[in-house]
Image (spheres, rainbow, N blue to C red):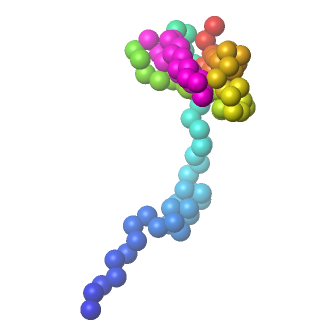
Amino acid sequence: MTKAMPKIGSRKTVCIGLRRNARFSLRKSARRITKGVIHVQASFKNTIITVTDPQGRVVFWSSAGNCGFKSSRKASPYAGQRTTVDAIRTVGLQ
């Protein structure tokens, strides 16, 4: 007869451990930086904005779909502008 293998990290133990003992956030808060580089990746379907610090580490990213634009409006210049403004405000750049 074979011995049953116990489940490692079963759903029951994970939920109890995370919910009861520790507080956690679903999304990390963005770091405040004074200087940064904004990378714009524009395609025919979507616009993605990435804010990095001068060393190249990603601080914050946002997309037009994340800001509420749908379908072909995600690729419009206005969607790119609003996404960039959202990213800049979140990070604290001027």
Q: Which residue reaches farthest left?
A: 1
Q: Residue at x 58, y 24 (%)?
A: 44
Magenta portion: prevailing SS class? strand
Residue 42 colored in magenta in the image: yes
- 2 in relation to 83, above or below: below
Point 63% across, 7% down: residue: 94
Q: Position of residue 19 (x, y in %)?
A: 59, 57
Q: How many marks can you see?
A: 0
- The image quadrant of residue 82 is top right
Q: Which residues are magenta?
A: 36-54
Residue 40 image point, x, y percent: 54, 17
Residue nearest the observer in this picture, 40 or 44: 44
Q: Residue at x 52, y 9 (%)?
A: 35
Residue 17 seen from this side: yes
Q: Is 39 rendered above or below residue 9?
A: above
Q: Percent from the top left, x then y, of residue 71?
A: 69, 33
In the displayed structure, would residue 71 be above or below residue 79? Answer: below
